[in-house]
Image: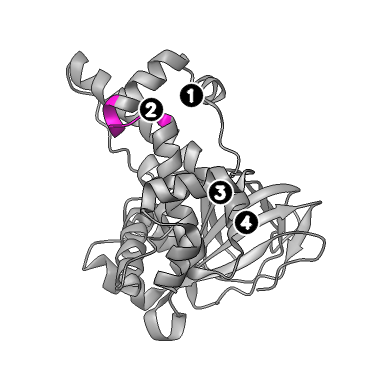
Amino acid sequence: MHPPSHSSLSLHRMAGDLADDGYCLSIWRGRCRRDQRLDVDLSRSAAVFALSLAGATKLGGIIADDEKILGAEQALMLNGAARPVWLASGGHRLLILEVTQEAIKIMGGGMPLRTEVEGLLEAADGQMLGPFEVGQDVLSLAQQLTQPPSHLVSLPVWYRAKVMELAALSFYCLGEQKMGNEGNGSMDRERSARELVQRATFLLERDLENPPGLEILAEELGCNAFQLSRFFSAEVGCSMPQYLRRKRMERAAALLHSTRLGVSEVSLAVGYTSFSAFTRAFVREHGETPTGFRHKTG
């Protein structure tokens, strides 16, 4: 895969190799100045799970009237046949997981595939399933995969475990509702508050460079700001600004450890326009300066 011209898109090969591991995880991240076509080379022997965390993606059909639009927080599956893929103008985070059919059987541990997924895998090349909405569990897991821990020695093992979890949710639990209709009012309220906070954390982490403010976030979630702030502190154990700072510093640490970006570039990438404010926040969270951290971990 190659990034298109006239954009700041970049392709990150996160983990795995189809030939050796049975899976490959990658993500397109960045911004398009206009609609751009990607040079996507998907394996014909793999099932493909594509999830848009931000931005709109269009997949051209094998026939003219078979196009699919993948919106933000939507996913689809296809059986690996080559298709033209466009990203609409704007910001994007498109996660793509390719898994061989042999690996799917192993990851499932004997669990039966969902009927629609089994049909997709047995169908002729070029078939697609979706787009469909995904649950908060899948969104949260995808978020973790795009922002791996920076200090984990066994990172390949961590990736494989997360990929297996994502595959299980996608290939075996696709479309199932985890919430029942029974329960008392107190439990329902607690569950609603928990889901509201999970949704809030996803939206905050989706764009650490420019996260929504409390009022905008509350409006998007359909609640008032005071209610959201109270629920958030109760569920997470800290205020929203504290949580946001911690996540930004975790992301900054990962960038310092795994990329050659300058410290000022890392600062901007996590939403700090003031270098001194970024340094203070980093020292507060990690106990040393960004430069010291890079020398220590590099």
- Name the one closer to the observer, 295 or 133: 295
In magenta segment, residue 32 = no
Residue at 67% in and 48% down:
91
Q: How far apart are marks 3 and 2 (CA)?
A: 24 Å
- Residue 199, relative to residue 251: is it above or below? above
Q: Separation of disc 1 and disc 2 at Cα?
A: 7 Å
**Mark 1: which amino acid?**
Leu
Whether the residues at callouts 1 and 2 have beta carbons within 8 Å, the answer is yes
The image's mark for residue 196 is: 2
Checking the image for residue 264, the label placed there is: 4
Q: What residue type is labelled 4?
A: Ser
Residue of label 3:
270
First in sequence: mark 1 or mark 2? 2
Give the extent of the magenta segment: 234-240
- Spatial CA distance of label 4 from label 3 is 10 Å
Question: Of label 4 and label 3, which has the lower sequence position?
Answer: 4
